[in-house]
Amino acid sequence: MGKAEFLSELRRRLFGLPEGEVAERLGFYSEMIDDRMEEGLSEEEAVAAIGSMQEIYLDIVDDIPLSAIVRERIKPYRRMSPWGIVATVLSSPIWLSLLVALLAVVVSLYAAAWSVVVSLLAVTLSLAVACLGGVLGGLVLLFIVAPKGAMLLGAALVSGSFSVPFFHLSRLLLKLLWRLTLAFPRWLKTVCIFRRIL
Amino acid sequence: MDAQLKRGLLDACVLAAIKDEDSYGYKIIKDMKPYLEMSESTLYTVLKRLELAAMLTVYTVEHGGRLRKYYRITPAGRRRIEEFKREWCEIRSIANFILKEDTDHGKS
């Protein structure tokens, strides 16, 4: 990839970020490439030395606060014509309620995911408690009514063995959900950057 | 590494790289290379943060028909380095304690 190609690709990816910020960053990378070429590297090598495009892109996205991206994203609407503003306000009962509904769906899906995890954890816990109680009770009962004691002991062990896969499943889901929660801000930023084109 | 700790280290590194003479992006990366591999995007972030904190100033110089940005350390930047040196003594004694714990566990 040549220098011009690299810079224009980066500019295309950063479309929607604050303009001054993008120009300054592009200038920075451009200077880096020039300095490397001055030292004897070919243009291609100098560009390659900067690192992968995707990494640079994600670094920049992580670096710019969400509020700045959103502010930039909202800017075009401030340049709306008076009629546009009137239309937006008049249609607000429609888009506002749709927006609220969408938000409600997202929040409830998220809450549902958490409740699945919580209920799985509860199942695990109750199986484990049943196992513990069964083993203790079974051991005591073994000395009073041996067959019943053995049965209770067996049932407790079955319940205990069931708790193991449930434990792993709930742990897996918990981890997954946690990772999703952590990845959400970055995802939101990239969405904001791309949707700007619309 | 802990993000806060890493940030402090990187800030001090870049300040140290410009403390003796004004420098530019690529030279800073080259000067730090034997000690620390820093990516361009990380350097940009650190320089920007230091500029906002008034620990360095930026000026542009024409070089070979193009512009190059130079970074100059301010008195506040120098104070930050001194501060870092003091903090480092603290960190070192903490690190010694942590490492000592580690070898003790290894023995037992």
Image (cartoon, coloured by chain):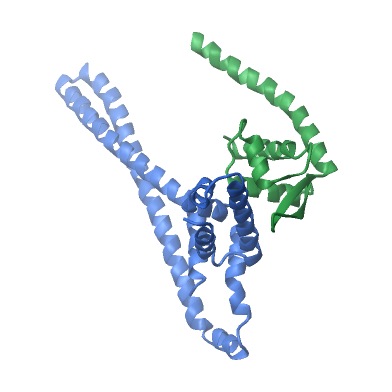
Chain colours: A blue, B green
Give the image location of residue B14, x and y in percent.
70, 40
Report which quarter residue A15 is drawn in.
Answer: bottom right
Q: Residue at x 49, y 51 (%)?
A: A44
Residue placed farthest to the left in the image? A147
Given residues A151 and A28, the one toward you in this image is: A28
Given residues B36 and B21, the one toward you in this image is: B21
The reply, left or right, for residue A181 in relation to residue A160 is right
Q: Residue at x 63, y 41 (%)?
A: B29
Report which quarter residue B76 is drawn in.
Answer: top right
- Disc tally is 0
Q: Residue at x 61, y 44 (%)?
A: A39
Report which quarter residue A163 is drawn in.
Answer: top left
Give the image location of residue B15, x and y in percent.
74, 39
Given residues A184 and A40, the one toward you in this image is: A40
Q: Residue at x 50, y 57 (%)?
A: A2
Position of A84 relative to B59 (above/below): below
Give the image location of residue A161, x and y in percent.
24, 31
The reply, left or right, for residue A131 in relation to residue A4 is left
Position of A34 relative to A123 (above/below): below
Residue placed farthest to the right in the image? B75
Residue placed farthest to the top in the image? B107
Give the image location of residue B11, x and y in percent.
69, 40
Position of B64 relative to B74 (above/below): below
> Residue B46, can we see it?
no
The reply, left or right, for residue A153 in relation to residue B4 is left
> Residue B97, can we see it?
yes
